[in-house]
Image (cartoon, rainbow, N blue to C red):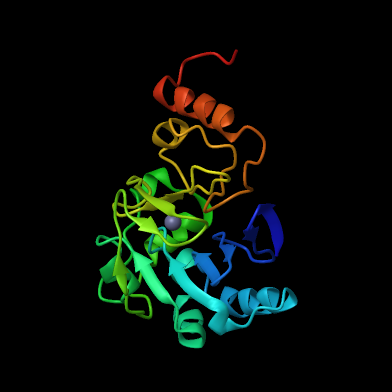
Amino acid sequence: MRQIAANVFGFSGWMMGRAYAIVDADGITLVDTGLQPAAAKIVKQLAVHGYRPPDIKRILITHAHPDHIGGLPELERLSGAVVYASAREKPVVEGREKSVYPPRETLSGIARLMAHDAELQPGTPVDAIIGEGDVIPALGGLRVIETPGHTAGHLAFWQPQPQQIEHHIPAKKNAALEPEIICFGHGSPLKNNAAAALQTFARRVANPTEKET
Ligand SMILES: [Zn+2]
């Protein structure tokens, strides 16, 4: 577990799907849970910092792909945490519908394989359905932002002050918030002037022919 910002930590040592821990006075909020084997790694890395599974109070799901909800059944069982997800992702989190992927031709590598092999996930009940503008009682009030694209019910989480946590694109919408730090579902967090990097990316997506300046 390594620190990304005040009270925000990232886990390390698995292949796909990032997960993050927000540390508050009342306990831990997890953002996503990695693949199934990640559950044990999350428990182990939290233990290094003196936290036990029941200290996990909330688990926020950005979207219901197996590399984000794989560790959820075990973590929910060990912690009894409140599970949050969007209405669109809920049936997938609960194991009643298969994961939905973007068109296969837009995917590559492992994502393409996962999309091909989409199966029902082991279900975990969603306790709280969240959507645009809802506020999660973590990090002093974490605002829910709907960011459909990667999946229809994809969520990002935004803390305007004094530090921020973000997830995934659509880049334009997130860039408008001018975040300083962004934690993605895949890849490394952007820690220095994330807004500028995101704006450049959003511009390039909007105008693919535009030359780099
Ligand atoms: Zn995904």
| Residue shown at the point (47%, 56%) measured from the top left | 111
Please, is residue 141 above or below residue 93 in the view? above
Please, is residue 204 above or below residue 184 in the view? above
Q: Is residue 34 visible?
A: no
| Residue shown at the point (46%, 60%) measured from the top left | 113
Q: Where ligand 1 lies, by quadrant?
A: bottom left
The image quarter in which residue 84 lies: bottom left
Residue 95, percent from left and from top: 31, 77
Q: Is residue 125 visible?
A: yes
| Residue shown at the point (45%, 70%) measured from the top left | 59
Task: Point out the residue furthest to the right here.
Answer: 48
| Residue shown at the point (39%, 72%) measured from the top left | 83
Residue 101, percent from left and from top: 35, 55
136 vs 100, left or right, is right
User: Considering depth in this image, is 22 or 125 the residue closer to the camera?
Assistant: 22
Specify the quadrant that holds the N terminus.
bottom right
